[in-house]
Image: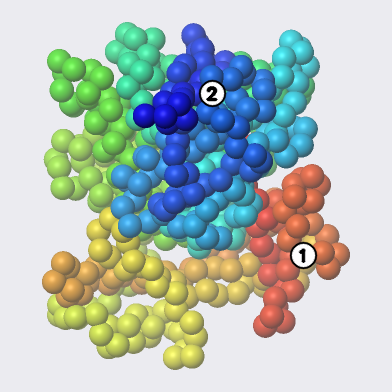
């Protein structure tokens, strides 16, 4: 074995400010650009060595290691997936400027460097595996559900953030040392806050030092151990302090993150009582599979959280213990009905397509097209689930906004989705189909979503420059209006980020 192949690096397994966290020795990731989930840390790769923190070399390997851990996790949870929206390799930019943040824009992951105004210590968002794997989680979700990117709904935007936080948690628990540390810190009571449930501690401290105590929690940017229950986001304020719930996506995401942490705790308690570590890690793996399956199947509607909860419960239906744990956790957060443990979404906008089991033929697709009210020349987008063999799809429908309250989006359209799901058995026979058309609730939610963006100044003025995500990030414009080839002006998303005050 040559010296290069024996070389090791030093990394933070968890956030640098997590309790008792010190750099540890680790194997460097290899073949990082290969599928699935290939990535490339931009810049010249330094030789793998145990570098000191706060050096460019350490940061390079820190980001590469975190992305490698994420790749390992998602390769297991999403077999058959692994290509990003823009191709086989996702670039990561270690230092893209001075800021206390990170973001994903479909082209790359962007990380930043700044200083804690109180301590004078350097803060690099790429040093935190929580932040790196959160942003990677955005990209993974975008890969398997690209239709969520532009969806004009509060709960869809919040779910993107919640998925990122769950990604960070699942990657952390995939490491035995971190899972053991969480058990030891809580003395086995994982419903207590711990170094895994708390996210981005170092960045949070710097955010509080710069923007004040309402900008983040005292000990983390967010904590999956929380007591937030579901309420309609339209009933909440646009923004609020870190300890209160608002409709802002990072804030509202804590409902679904907290609910999934509750599922994790219940699953771990139902596991092997004599081996807490094995039980916790198996619970994390089971939760990851459930979340991946539900995320693939949930229609992009105004009530995304409760629909996701329903799909999560369905994904758990193969095991009574798992189903009970999921049901109790989601019911306690008001994500499932206490009476039936499954919300009733049937309305005029939802219908079943009835037929005897038969192969997936043109007749089946024509029946779905008819239920959607789509013309034969309209495009219907179809995607296959990687977890259960079902097919999902949608017809995109423009909803035009009109009024000064929409700011730069006045006169532009947002895309609503009329969705369908087709159940396909291993034999290839279709056994059921469900169609859900976007109704008045989706239209009003979309209008209020855009009105909120306009109030907060998040929509860029049209200047003909297109979707320059880096410039729009500097201007804090998450959305822009694009004049598209068919002559329609549509509202598009430029990036998703860690919340910045």
The location of residue 72, given as percent across then percent down, is 37, 40
Q: Nearer the viewer, residue 402 or 55?
A: 55
Local packing at callout 2 (Cα closer than 10 Å; few below 14, some 14-19, many 20+) is some
The residue pinned by badge 2 equals 49
Q: Is residue 391 visible?
A: yes
Image quarter of the C terminus: top right
Q: Residue furthest right?
A: 463
**Mark 1 → mark 2, Cα distance in angstroms:** 42 Å
Q: Secondary structure at mark 2?
A: loop
Q: Secondary structure at mark 1?
A: loop
The residue pinned by badge 1 equals 466
Which residue: 44% across, 39% down? Answer: 30
Among the two numbered marks 1 and 2 on one chain, the one whose residue lies closer to the N terminus: 2
Q: Is residue 106 left or right of residue 170?
A: right
Q: Nearer the viewer, residue 385 or 154?
A: 385
Image quarter of the N terminus: top left
Q: Is residue 189 above or below residue 354?
A: above
Which residue: 28% across, 28% down? Answer: 281
The location of residue 185, given as percent across then percent down, is 39, 10
Which residue: 33% across, 40% down? Answer: 288
Q: Is residue 365 left or right of residue 457?
A: left
- The label nearer to you, 1 versus 2, is 2
Q: Is residue 244 visible?
A: no
Q: Is residue 96 above or below residue 270?
A: below
Q: Is residue 23 above or below residue 153?
A: above
Residue 116, quarter of picture: top right
The location of residue 328, given as percent across then percent down, is 27, 34
The location of residue 192, given as percent across then percent down, is 39, 16
């Amino acid at each position: 074995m040559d010296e290069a192949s024996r070389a090791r690096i030093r990394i933070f397994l968890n956030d640098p400010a997590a309790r008792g966290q010190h750099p540890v020795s680790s194997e460097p990731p290899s073949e990082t650009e290969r599928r699935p989930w290939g990535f490339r840390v931009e810049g010249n790769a330094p030789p793998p060595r145990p570098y000191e923190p706060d050096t460019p070399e350490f940061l390079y390997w820190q980001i590469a290691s975190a992305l490698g851990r994420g790749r390992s996790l998602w390769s297991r949870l999403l077999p058959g997936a692994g290509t990003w929206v823009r191709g086989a390799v996702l670039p990561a930019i270690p230092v893209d400027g001075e800021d206390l943040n990170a973001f994903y824009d479909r082209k790359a992951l962007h990380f930043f460097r700044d200083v804690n105004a109180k301590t004078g210590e350097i803060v690099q968002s790429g040093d935190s595996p929580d932040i790196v794997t959160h942003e990677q989680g955005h990209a993974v979700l975008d890969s398997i559900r690209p239709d969520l990117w532009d969806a004009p709904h509060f709960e869809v935007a919040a779910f993107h953030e919640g998925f990122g936080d769950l990604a960070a948690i699942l990657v952390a628990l995939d490491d035995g040392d971190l899972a053991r540390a969480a058990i030891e810190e809580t003395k086995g009571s994982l419903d207590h806050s711990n170094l895994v449930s708390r996210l981005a501690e170092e960045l949070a401290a710097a955010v509080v030092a710069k923007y004040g105590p309402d900008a983040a929690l005292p000990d983390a940017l967010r904590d999956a151990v929380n007591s937030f229950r579901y309420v309609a986001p339209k009933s909440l304020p646009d923004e609020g302090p870190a300890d209160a719930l608002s409709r802002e996506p990072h804030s509202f995401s804590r409902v679904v993150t907290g609910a999934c942490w509750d599922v994790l705790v219940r699953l771990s308690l139902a596991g092997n009582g004599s081996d807490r570590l094995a039980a916790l890690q198996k619970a994390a793996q089971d939760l990851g599979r459930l979340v991946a399956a539900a995320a693939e199947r949930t229609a992009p509607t105004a009530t995304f959280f409760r629909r996701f909860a329903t799909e999560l419960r369905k994904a758990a239906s193969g095991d009574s213990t798992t189903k009970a744990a999921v049901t109790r956790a989601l019911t306690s957060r008001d994500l499932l009905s206490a009476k039936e443990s499954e919300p009733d979404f049937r309305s005029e906008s939802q219908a079943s397509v009835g037929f005897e089991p038969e192969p997936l033929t043109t007749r089946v697709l024509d029946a779905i097209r008819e239920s959607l009210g789509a013309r034969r020349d309209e495009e219907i987008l179809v995607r296959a689930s990687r977890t259960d063999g079902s097919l999902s799809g949608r017809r995109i429908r423009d909803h035009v906004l009109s009024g000064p309250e929409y700011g730069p989006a006045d006169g532009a359209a947002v895309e609503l989705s009329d969705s369908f799901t087709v159940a396909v058995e291993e034999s290839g026979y279709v056994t059921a189909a469900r169609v859900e058309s976007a109704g008045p609730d989706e239209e009003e939610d979309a209008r209020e979503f855009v009105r909120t963006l306009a109030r907060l100044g998040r929509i860029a003025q049209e200047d003909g420059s297109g979707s320059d995500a880096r410039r729009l990030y500097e201007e804090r414009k998450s959305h822009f209006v694009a004049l598209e080839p068919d002559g329609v002006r549509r509202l598009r998303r430029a990036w998703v980020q860690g919340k910045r005050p």
